[in-house]
Amino acid sequence: MKLKLKALKETKSFYKWKLKQKNLTEKERNKFLEALKIIEKIIKKKEESGEKEKHKKSIAYDHKNRIAEKGGLNNYGC
């Protein structure tokens, strides 16, 4: 399972917010703290390794226009 850096940071923020709540039991608080430590280690490893978020925009390739620009299918050996 591949975890994305952005999702990890969002989860870290959520856990920090949860820990500020007064109505947590000691057991719940300990679980959040333990999970937060693990998340911080993973984030640190990913940042040290230089992992970056992938560029999400893809450029659509319009085959019909490319073929028309080249003068039809005959120029492609068809």
Image (spheres, grey):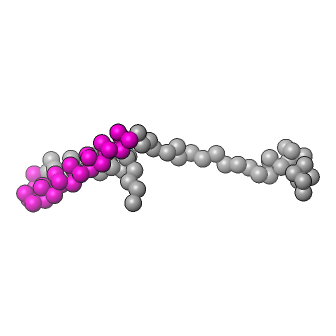
Residue 15 % position (x, y):
22, 51
Residue 61 % position (x, y):
70, 48
Residue most toward the left? 26
Residue 28 is one of the magenta-drawn residues: yes
Residue 57 % position (x, y):
56, 45
Residue 32 is one of the magenta-drawn residues: yes
**Residue at position x 45%, y 44% in the image:** 53
Residue most toward the right? 74
* Residue 70 in which image quadrant: top right
- Position of residue 59 in the picture relative to residue 65 (left or right): left
Number of numbered discs overlaid on the protein picture: 0
Q: What secondary structure predominates along the stretch shown in magenta?
A: helix
Is the C terminus in the top left, top right, bottom left or bottom right quadrant? bottom right
- Position of residue 66 in the picture relative to residue 19 (left or right): right
**Residue at position x 26%, y 46% in the image:** 41
Residue 14 % position (x, y):
26, 50
* Residue 48 in which image quadrant: top left
**Residue at position x 36%, y 44% in the image:** 46
Seen from the viewer's position, the closer of residues 14 and 45 is 45
Seen from the viewer's position, the closer of residues 52 and 69 is 52
Is the N terminus in the top left, top right, bottom left or bottom right quadrant? bottom left
Start and end of the magenta stretch? Answer: 22-49
Instruction: Reply above or below: 66 against 28.
Output: above
- Position of residue 73 in the picture relative to residue 39 (left or right): right
Residue most toward the front? 49
Instruction: Reply above or below: 47 against 1.
Output: above
